[in-house]
Amino acid sequence: MTSQTPNPALLHTQLPDALFAQYAAESVNKLAAADKLEIIEKLHLLELIFDTRRYEIMDAILAEDFVMDHALAKRLDRASFKQLWQDNEAVLLNGIRHQLTNVIVYPNHDETATAIAYLNVLKFANTSTLSKTDNPALLAHAVQVVQFRKENDVWKLAHLKIDQMAVSDIFGLDKATRDYFAALAGEREQLGQPLF
């Protein structure tokens, strides 16, 4: 991983207070186990879609007005989100696998749900766009927060935020770009522009 100087505010992980509120007090707003399982499965399925290039499946799990807020890019609908990955496969996906860990799902008061996970981006093969290294190699580690809502009794991803990303030196990014990836999503607009 990179030897970037950490942002003092990010020496510990920043997560929504609502995640912990459900455990700190008696929560009356609960999700059924079946709802949690469906949400967790779709969260992991999105990563497998990237790794297998099965973009057509995105229509079944993403809301049409799906929003992605990532240091790489910000997209405001499902179609442009799909296009981002299709147009940039060689750089963003070849030789790479995505893995989620520490997944937690909790309900929101507006009948939506939030899923939080750590995202690991792993290099498993050498490609023309990635430096030659021993494989596998950890390329990046980030916090992923996803808002889900029900559409016709089916949970769909509505908003994906990825921030607090540590990026490997394999990419050769300068300090300003590494700081941009490491920032909280709300701070990114002050630091620079998305790469795509």
Image (tube, rainbow, N blue to C red):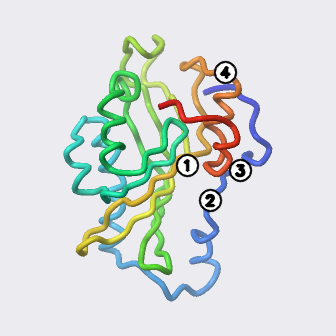
Query: Disc 2 on helix, strand or loop?
Result: loop
Please provide percent x and percent y for residue 184: 65, 48
Looking at the image, residue 161 sits to the left or right of residue 16; the answer is left
Does the residue at mark 1 contact the one at mark 3 (Cβ under 8 Å)? no
Residue 20 to residue 56: above or below: below
The residue that mark 2 highlights is 15
Disc 1 vs disc 3: which is toward the camera? 1
Which amino acid, by three-letter code, is at mark 1?
A: Val
Residue 190 to residue 26: above or below: above
Examine the image and state in which quarter residue 25 appears.
Answer: bottom right
| Frontmost residue, 99 versus 176 | 176
Query: Disc 4 on helix, strand or loop?
Result: loop
Disc 3 vs disc 4: which is toward the camera? 4
The residue carrying pointer 4 sits among few (fewer than 14), some (14 to 19) or many (20 or more) residues within 10 Å by Cα, namely: few
Residue that appears at 72% across and 46% down? 10
Residue that appears at 64% across and 39% down? 182
